[in-house]
Image: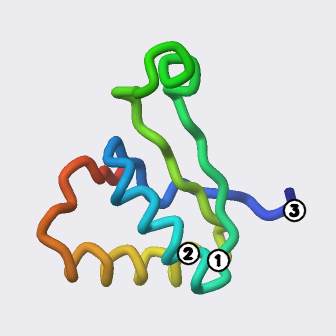
Amino acid sequence: MDNNEYVKLTTSTNKLIFDEICGFLEDNNIPYFVKDDGDFMRIVSGFSIYEKGIYVSEKDFEKANELLVYFMNDRDDTEGLYFD
């Protein structure tokens, strides 16, 4: 990982939406990392009720946030997507 500070872009419990957001970031060459609070639960039971957080660098946050707003405005099914 580089020396940039990373900030939380969003969290989600909805895997499909989560994967699409990650795809948007990848398609736009925005590096990110994921913090998953439910790894152990997913290993044991195959699923998790815990959120996965998507973090981007401070320098990419504005562009990533614009993509996220575009994503949300283009969909009706953003249940499970959270912002701090």
Q: Are marks 2 and 1 in contact (CB under 8 Å)?
A: yes
Question: Pointer 3 and pointer 2: residues touching (CB < 8 Å)?
Answer: no
The numbered dot on residue 2 is 3
Q: Circle 2 sits on which residue? A: 25
Farthest residue toward the right?
A: 2
Q: Amino acid at mark 1?
A: Ile
Could you classify mark 1 by the number of other residues whose Cα lies within 10 Å: few (under 14), some (14-19), or many (20 or more)?
A: some
**Residue sticking out furthest to the front:** 46
Front-lying residue, 21 or 10: 21
What count of labels does the image hold? 3
Q: Secondary structure at mark 3?
A: loop
Residue 2 appears in which quarter of the rendering?
Answer: bottom right
Residue 81, percent across and down? 29, 53
Q: Is residue 10 above or below residue 76?
A: above
Which tag is nearer the camera, tag 3 or tag 1? 1
Image x and y of residue 41, in percent: 49, 18
**Which residue appears at 40% of the width and 29% of the height?**
50
**CA gap, disc 2 and disc 1:** 5 Å
Q: CA distance from mark 3 to mark 1?
A: 13 Å
Callout 2, which amino acid? Leu
Relative to 39, is 48 on the left or the right? left
Q: Earlier in the sequence, mark 3 or mark 2?
A: 3
What residue is rendered at 31% in x and 77% in y? 71
Dot 1: element: loop
Residue type at numbered disc 3: Asp
Residue at numbered disc 1: 30
Q: Residue at x 31, y 50 (%)?
A: 82
